[in-house]
Image: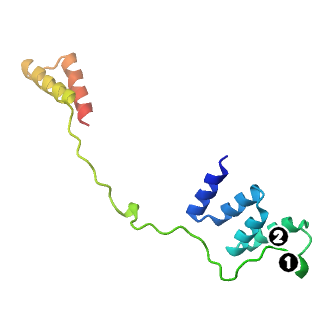
């Protein structure tokens, strides 16, 4: 799969757990740890720290091992995409009026002429033309 597009989608959507998971999948464990730690995903950061240091799940980190982990800034902020200037779901899109084409007008005229000639009794050919004209108008 395309890793770059998946990462960009997670970045644009502000999906931090998806970013961390994707970075870990491609082997960027230090970057995944820093991303998880910076964005407050402590449980995921601890699991990644154990992977980085080669510890099992039962072992806990001591101060010496914690010093070996990549540093994170306490003043770091969550990276989210900017909000859109206008919200599309609040507005109704403009609708264009669609005129009937030349063939639909010709069918409607033929149906009207056929109905007038037969005195209101339609034949099967004129009723099918009228049905086609009605379908084209809809």
In the visual, does 56 lie left or right of 23? right
Residue sitting at x 39%, y 61%:
88
Comparing 59 with 84, the one in front is: 84
Counting labels gives 2
Q: What residue is pinned by disc 2?
A: 49
Marks 1 and 2 close (CB-CB < 8 Å): yes
Q: What residue is pinned by disc 1?
A: 66
Q: How is the image coloured?
A: rainbow
Q: Is residue 55 above or below residue 71?
A: above
Residue sitting at x 16%, y 26%:
106
Residue sitting at x 16%, y 20%:
122
The quadrant holding residue 27 is bottom right
Residue 133 visible? The answer is: yes
The quadrant holding residue 77 is bottom right
In the visual, does 22 lie left or right of 129? right
Residue sitting at x 19%, y 29%:
102
Residue 104 place in picture, x, y as percent: 21, 29
Q: Secondary structure at mark 1?
A: helix
Comparing 112 with 94, the one in front is: 94
Residue 62 visible? The answer is: no
Upstream in sequence: badge 1 or badge 2? 2
Q: Secondary structure at mark 2?
A: helix
Q: Is residue 56 above or below residue 67?
A: above
State the separation of the CA atoms marked 1 and 2: 8 Å
Q: Is residue 4 above or below residue 77?
A: above
The quadrant holding residue 132 is top left
Residue 14 place in picture, x, y as percent: 58, 65
């Amino acid at each position: 799969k395309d890793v770059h597009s998946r990462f960009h989608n997670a970045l644009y959507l502000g999906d931090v757990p998806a970013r961390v998971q994707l970075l870990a999948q491609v082997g960027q464990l230090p970057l995944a740890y820093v991303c998880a730690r910076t964005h407050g995903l402590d449980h995921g950061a601890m699991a990644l720290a154990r992977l980085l240091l080669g510890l099992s799940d039962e072992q806990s980190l001591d101060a010496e091992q914690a010093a070996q982990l990549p540093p994170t800034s306490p003043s770091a902020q969550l990276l989210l995409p900017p909000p859109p200037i206008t919200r599309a779901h609040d507005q109704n899109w403009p609708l264009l009026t669609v005129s009937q084409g030349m063939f639909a007008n010709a069918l409607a005229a033929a149906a009207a002429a056929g109905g007038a000639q037969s005195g209101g009794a339609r034949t099967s050919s004129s009723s099918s033309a009228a049905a086609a004209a009605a379908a084209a108008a809809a």
